[in-house]
């Protein structure tokens, strides 16, 4: 079984910064893609950013230039550095990883609340 533990959410003023972390543990041979998604009030869950095992990244247009995704493979951890936060960034942020244990399977974190006040 694989567990994901997220941390780093909270309340911040508009223009502020936060750093989210998501650490994976359990029965993991290799982690392929790691990513962050978010779900705002009344909205569907949407992609924020993803990073491959090779370090290639992809961002949603609404966070380009403000958010940075990174990963530490030795720690099985993915990070999301969020700068210039806006009230529209308010959401529950979820990490998602794809684990390769001879077959691919994905896992979600429990979510962490990010609230940006104006």
Image (tube, rainbow, N blue to C red):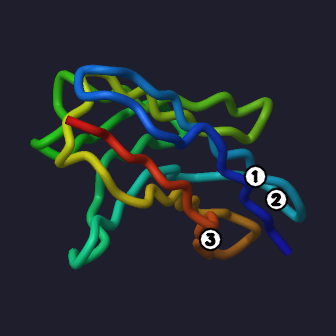
Residue pointed to by mark 3: 107
SS at mark 2?
loop
Q: Residue furthest left?
A: 61
SS at mark 3?
strand
Q: In this image, 114 relative to 72: left or right?
A: left
Residue pointed to by mark 1: 24
Residue pointed to by mark 2: 28
Q: In this image, 44 relative to 50: left or right?
A: left
**Where is residue 49, by image quadrant?**
top left
Residue mark closest to the camera, 3 vs 2: 3
What residue appears at the point 12 percent right and 42 percent down from the top-left corner? 62
**Where is residue 57, by image quadrant?**
top left
**Marks 1 & 3, CB-CB < 8 Å contact:** yes
Tell me residue 114's x, y (percent). 43, 47
SS at mark 1?
strand
The answer for how far apart the CA atoms under marks 3 and 2 are is: 11 Å
What residue appears at the point 22 percent right and 78 percent down from the top-left corner? 42
Tell me residue 58's x, y (percent). 27, 41
Q: Residues within 10 Å of mark 2 (few under 14, many from 20)?
A: some
Query: In the image shown, does 27 or 95 lie closer to the viewer?
Result: 95
């Amino acid at each position: 079984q694989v567990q994901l533990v997220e941390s780093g959410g909270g309340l911040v003023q508009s223009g502020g910064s936060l750093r989210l972390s998501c650490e994976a543990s359990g029965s993991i041979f290799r982690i392929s893609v790691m990513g962050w998604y978010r779900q705002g009030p009344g909205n569907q869950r949407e992609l924020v950013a993803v990073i491959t095992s090779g370090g290639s990244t992809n961002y949603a247009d609404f966070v380009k230039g403000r958010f940075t995704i990174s990963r530490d493979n030795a720690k099985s951890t993915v990070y999301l550095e969020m700068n210039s936060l806006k009230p529209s960034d308010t959401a529950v942020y979820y990490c998602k990883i794809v684990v390769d244990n001879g077959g691919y399977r994905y896992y979600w974190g429990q979510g962490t609340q990010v609230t940006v006040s104006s």
